[in-house]
Amino acid sequence: MAESTKISSVFSQLQSQGEMAFMPFITAGDPDMETTLALIRELTTRGVHLIEIGFPYSDPIADGPVIQASYTRALNAGIHVDDIFSGIESLNHDETPPLVAMVSYAIVLRLGPENFLDRAKAAGFSGLIVPDLPADVADELPQLAGSRGLDLIQLIAPTTTDERVGRILKSATGFLYCISLAGTTGVRDELPEELKGQLDSLRAKTDLPLAVGFGISRPEQVEMLRGSAHGVIVGSGIVRHLESISKDSTTADEVVNAIGEFASEMVHAVAADDR
């Protein structure tokens, strides 16, 4: 039996209570690292269960225009991997939920996989998602991460073949990031009808929790996933709030509070069905 991690413990506790997990996504350094840390603290007080933190990259994989724009803003402001690690390390991790790094393998490779994982662990991350993980290191990186107590969360899309799903299930830990639809991230009005069947098929193959991302932006979308998914991930629906800092006269404090209010609504939505 796999050793319990901070991430798996969160899902186990929620499942025992009949609840789902809510994991918001934010881009590190958008518009600056100070605001990112303020957001993490705000989301923590709002009771989110995990937080996904994007490492800005000039050629993001599968990210829609909203998140791509946030990466561009952060890079233009001069964000560096060192800034992300030092900022995350400054947090009180006895209080924060598990933090998950969304990072391109190009960044991991540039720093060196073992060095990156050591720094991620020291900073306080509990796991990472590498959306462009090459097939030739798909076995090595999970082992390196696991030896440091880090979960390597892997993505499964509607287009993922059965053969590849089998390979992913052998090395994935923490939870599975289930992409709700083919294409890039972004806010959408409806989730595809076939999603529930895809999730039910995965549940028959693995005990790993299933968290659904891409296209989720409203509390009412949670209900169609109840009973099939163990968690929901919201990215573009949150990141677009940050655009208003540069486009409008909205202050960072106002945006942080607005995102906190939205997070509260989502936390309530994923609570037990008999709430």
Image (cartoon, rainbow, N blue to C red):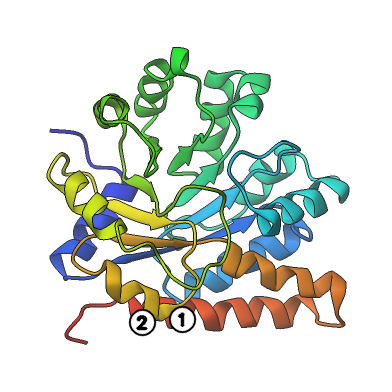
Q: Position of residue 117 (x, y in %)?
A: 51, 28
Q: Position of residue 261 (x, y in %)?
A: 54, 84
Which quadrant is the N terminus positioned in? top left
Task: Please say whether residue 163 is visible from this viewpoint.
Answer: yes
20 relative to 253 in the view: left or right: left
Q: Position of residue 17 (x, y in %)?
A: 16, 70
Task: Check disc 2 and report its element: helix, strand or loop.
Answer: helix
Residue at (73, 56) in percent of width and height = 70
Q: Which image quadrant for residue 42?
A: bottom right
Vertical side of 112 occupied by 214: above or below: below
Foreground of the two, 209 or 78: 209
Vertical side of 188 occupied by 61: above or below: above
Q: Residue furthest bottom?
A: 275
Separation of residues labelled 1 and 2 (CA atoms): 6 Å
Identify residue type, mark 2.
His
Foreground of the two, 124 or 26: 26
Whether residues under marks 1 and 2 lie with C-beta atoms below 8 angstroms apart, the answer is yes
Task: Check disc 1 and report its element: helix, strand or loop.
Answer: helix
Q: Which residue is mark 2?
A: 268
Disc 2 residue crowd, few under 14, some 14–19, many 20+, Cα 10 Å: some
Task: Please say whether residue 124 is visible from this viewpoint.
Answer: no
Foreground of the two, 31 or 179: 179
45 relative to 231 in the view: left or right: right
1 relative to 224 in the view: left or right: left
Q: Which label was assigned to residue 264?
A: 1
Residue at (23, 64) in percent of width and height = 14
